[in-house]
Image: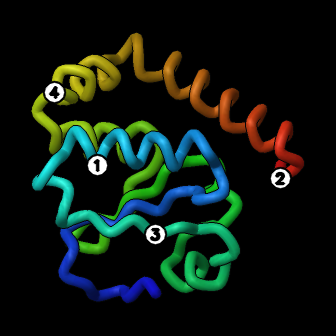
Amino acid sequence: MYRKKNHHKLVVFYDGSCEGCIKDRARYEHWAGSGGHDIYWFDITGREEVLSSLGINPYKALRELHVQTEHGEVVTELDAYILLMKRVPRLKPLAWLIGLPLIRPCLSWTYRTWVRQRLEREGRA
């Protein structure tokens, strides 16, 4: 059960019904090594009430990655990915790259399109 106050520095709200999301989590945990131990992975599947109580729109949580910082701030979509990537040395250059002004909007559109198509294929859109 997720608690608003916890000892983790980051809470990652992810779609545990998404096979790709589960693989991405495992890959991230592997790359992060011991640096990933202060992350709490919260599966949003069927947790609409908890999300709403935290001020997170469940509809948006399914379509965009949400990460809550140790200060309670919730960052979404590419900002959430950049935050996570900056914590892993091998991913820092990628975090910088996806934050560039010309790349960021294109990647954001691609990401949103990919998620929408995945949810439609799964009948969850």
Q: Quadrant location of residue 78?
A: top left
Separation of disc 4 and disc 2 at Cα? 34 Å
Sooner in the amino-acid sequence: mark 1 or mark 3: 1
Q: Is residue 54 above or below residue 84?
A: below
Q: Are marks 2 and 3 in contact (CB under 8 Å)?
A: no
Type of amino acid at the residue the image marks with label 2:
Arg
Identify which amino acid the numbered label 4 is placed on: Arg
How far apart are the two marked residues, 3 and 4, measured between alpha carbons?
Answer: 24 Å
Q: Which mark is residue 90?
A: 4
- Disc 1 vs disc 2: which is toward the camera? 1
Instruction: Please give the residue where the numbered disc 3 appears in the rendered image.
Output: 42
The residue that disc 1 covers is: 29
Question: In the rendered view, would you say 33 is above or below 116?
Answer: below
Categorize mark 3 by other alpha carbons within 10 Å: few (<14), some (14-19), many (20+).
some
The relative height of residue 81 versus residue 56 in the rendered view (above or below) is above
Which is more N-terminal, label 4 or label 3?
A: 3
Q: Are marks 1 and 4 in contact (CB under 8 Å)?
A: no
Q: Earlier in the sequence, mark 2 or mark 3?
A: 3
Q: Quadrant of residue 112?
A: top right
Q: Secondary structure at mark 4?
A: helix
Task: Give the image location of residue 108, x and y in percent.
Answer: 52, 28
